[in-house]
Amino acid sequence: MAERKNTEFDRPGGYATPRGATQIQRESAADLPDADIRLLGDDVAPHVPATAAVEPVHRSTDPDTRLYVGDCRDVIPNLPDHGEVDLVFADPPFNWDVPYDEWSDGMPRAEYERFTYDWLDACVDALAPHGSIWVNIPDDTAAEIVMHLKRRGLTMINWCAWHFRFGQHRDSSFIMSKVHALYFAKDPNQRIWNPDSILEQSDRASVYNDPRTQAKGRNAGMRVPMDVWYGPYWGRVQGNNKERRARHHNQIPEVYLERVILACSDEGGLVLDPFCGSGTTSTVARAWNRRSITTEYGAGNADSAWERIDGIGMLRKGQSTGGSSAIGKPRGDRKP
């Protein structure tokens, strides 16, 4: 049955339309910093950043691209661009005992949480008033990051999920096939948001060839992507993937960063990644004419990442947009 108007609701058009999660988050963001939210890592003393000038180990121009070697908690507060960053993207160590270059990835839980809050604070403080932050994180730390960013006064815009089909095999529980992509803004009313740059085909267009969506005045047959991300080139970067960098772990596909960077920064804007890894963020930022800053704890990983950032470059530019993520095939003879 079609939705009917209900005059008992004081909503536009008389429909019982919810105000939406973002509006509710905006209203609560001002109250949460004063709430007594206590997390395990709060019992560990915070990191005290070193105070010293920092110089990039690697740098390129046009656009300005910098890679610093060191602890991001020390580097970020001393950046000359501190307070001017448009977008942060972070894919931190998960504390899963992964053999990273020089980083110890097996902290006691409380210490790991404290480390998490420290680098989050450094990134939040580096943002411009209109800046946004994205964090890529699995189940076991997603809630703590959400609560910490909320108590820092940021507003959640989306809790997205990056879905992949080839999770690591296990038979003791359901196979993990997603990682959380948490999107927060300092001020949702000022944030950079470019929806037209990330459009994909709607199911109405790609599956049903619905003439109504093709008749739209602008962006006919297109939509902003949904908050579960999957599709061609969206899988985990395995050994036979041409994006794969052999030295690095937990590599994120280029299309993921392309979507985030196009949506939440402008050409010429400044993107910060506190955990360089294989260099995906700066590689994609550079391809799309964004300035970028990244830090890496180990010099060996930094050198390897720079080969990609400044040499190889982006391999799948433009592959995150324009296509369809529909699960179903076109219906009958209704082909797009």
Image (cartoon, rainbow, N blue to C red):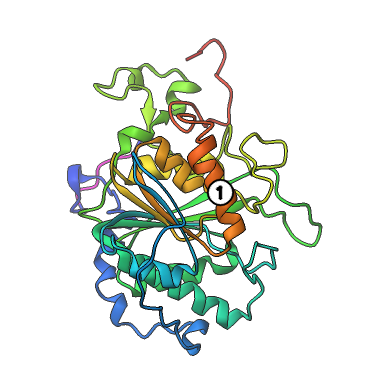
Please identify the residue farthest to the right as the structure is shown: 171
| Residue at 57% in and 60% down | 299
Residue 74 in view (yes/no): yes
- Image coordinates for residue 210, horizontal then vertical, percent: 41, 19
Quarter of the rendering occupied by the N terminus: top left
Q: How crowded is mark 1: few (under 14 residues within 10 Å), some or many (20 or more)?
A: many
Q: Which of 320 and 67 is in front in this view?
A: 67
Quick check: 88 left or right of 331? left
- The magenta stretch spans residue 41: no
Which structural element holds mark 1?
helix
Quick check: 243 left or right of 127? right
To which quarter of the image does residue 268 belong?
Answer: top left
- Image coordinates for residue 130, horizontal then vertical, percent: 23, 56
Q: Which of 75 and 167 is in front in this view?
A: 75
Quick check: 69 left or right of 96? left
Q: What stretch is highlighted in magenta?
A: 3-7
To which quarter of the image does residue 232 belong?
Answer: top right
Quick check: 186 left or right of 101? left
| Residue at 42% in and 30% down | 200
Residue beneath disc 1? 305
To which quarter of the image does residue 149 belong?
Answer: bottom left
- Image coordinates for residue 320, horizontal then vertical, percent: 47, 33
Main secondary-structure element of the magenta-colored stretch: loop
| Residue at 58% in and 34% down | 233
The type of residue carrying mark 1 is Ala
Height in image: 81 above or below 270?
below
| Residue at 54% in and 10% down | 333
- Image coordinates for residue 304, horizontal then vertical, percent: 59, 49
Q: Nearer the viewer, residue 45 or 185?
A: 45
Residue 147 in view (yes/no): no
